[in-house]
Amino acid sequence: MGSIPKENSFWGNSLFFKDLNYKNISAGLVAGIFIITGPTALILEASKNGNFSPSQTILWIFAVYVIGGLFGIFLPLYSRVPIVGGHTLTGVAFLATVTSQFTFHELIGSYLISGLLMVLIGALGFFSKLMKLVPKEIISAMLAGMITKYMVNFIVSINELLIVGFIPLIAFFIFSRWKLKVPPVIAAILFGVFGLILFHPLHNVQWTNAMMMPAIQLPEFNPLSILSVSVPLALLILSNDAAVAVGALEQNNYRTPIKQIICFSGLFSIITNFFGGQSANIAGMGTVICSDDAAGPKEKRYMGAVVTGTLLLVFGLFSWKLVPLIQALPKDFISVIVGFSLLGVFGTSLHQAFLRQDMKMSTLFAFIIALSNITVASISAPVWSLLIGTIIARYIEGITAAQGEKQSKKTA
């Protein structure tokens, strides 16, 4: 739980390549593919909803993958712990619902406040206390409500694409049933791409030869965007990325430097913000993949995180070339990729939200409000979902922080 031991630091042993093996390389590649596919499609949708320019869209993708990749290279090499870097999938799903309400630069201002909040929470050791203020069931209900529309579009798009849509679905079920080494989501996406190439070749890709150089983006601070974006974004990163990742590391018996992880997630996010991205933080599912027993010997699993970080870095550096290809994909195919990427998050969120019998009313209202995507007094639905859900839980259902913690331990 404490600081990173010096004897395990990057500077104490730079011959890290000897720790590479096929198991941690495989885990790193799988985690990288997961972080690249669905989230990139969601960024494109969020950019489209916000009417961002092509350069702003590419800058966003460049920022989160380059800085997120550097996060995932530096921290595991320094700590010898499989801390996977990336950016927040659930955060981008949330942003897709609010980008139409604010300008690109107002969003950057709200991202910056979110990053500063994470630095403060990490430095002051408030991570555990903050997670108790808003019941995790309310956060899960809000998240499930936000992404329900993606899951509906997922099923509709499979039906629209027919063969191309059913190929990844069948692959997903096969890999789920027989517990094969490749995660079902990754298999579904790869088979989906294969089916698209086979039955729906792309002819309208507008390749560009003009390399885009990153440029500093100045933030604009709007109180409404800070309230509507900063707090929900920070909560989603902390609850759905940091908490999941820390839980996976502790479950696999790693000495987990929680304060440093949260602080670095905030600091790297702030750097990312100035290039147009929302965050660069510890990746929840990526860390789960790379810290698992399947990633090889415990003391060498950190190299899986380095492999992931390198893959993200390369993708980000060449995003100016790759984004036109992704944009040329059929809309329904994008919905299928997003659906598979969010499927696990959606199922887990629904399960956690409605697991407790004594919180049915609060979680139900939180879910419905988030699903409605309403805006009241210029404040977005996720904020109202968290606020009203928490008020009902605390003052109508009588759920206290102590009760929530006790129940969480019981159902863990």
Image: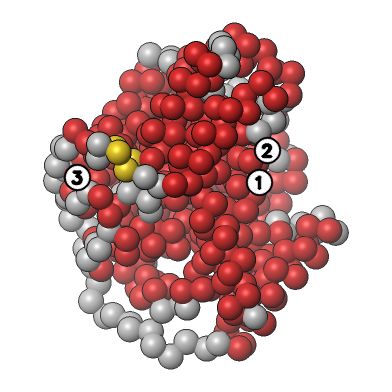
**Which residue corresponds to the image point at 51% horizontal and 56% vertical from the top-left?**
149
Mark 3 or mark 2: which is in front?
2
Query: Considering only vertical position in the picture, is 97 above or below 15?
Result: below
Side (left or right) of 21 relative to 147: right
SS at circle 3: helix
Q: Residue at x 58, y 16 (%)?
A: 397
Cα separation between marks 3 and 2: 34 Å
> Do we see residue 211 in this rendering?
yes
Identify the disc placed on residue 351: 2
User: Could you tell which of marks 3 and 1 lies nearer the N-terminus?
Assistant: 3
Q: Is residue 106 left or right of residue 194?
A: left
Identify which amino acid the numbered label 3 is placed on.
Answer: Glu
Residue 87 visible from this viewpoint: no
> Quick one: label 2, few (<14), some, or many (20+) residues within 10 Å?
some
Q: Kindly identify which residue carries mark 3.
A: 106
Percent x, y of residue 367: 53, 39
Image quarter where the N terminus lies is: top right
Q: Which structural element holds mark 2?
A: helix
Q: Which mark is residue 347?
A: 1
The residue at the far right in this view is 178
Rendering coords of residue 189 (x, y %):
61, 67
Q: How is the image coloured?
A: secondary structure
* Discs 2, 1 touching: Cβ within 8 Å: yes
- Which amino acid, by three-letter code, is at mark 2? His
**Which one is nearer the viewer's eye here, 379 or 349?**
379
Whole-percent x, y for residue 81 in the image: 58, 33
In this rendering, position of residue 235 left or right of residue 256: left
SS class, disc 1: helix
Q: Residues within 10 Å of mark 1 (few under 14, many from 20)?
A: few
Q: Amino acid at mark 1?
A: Gly
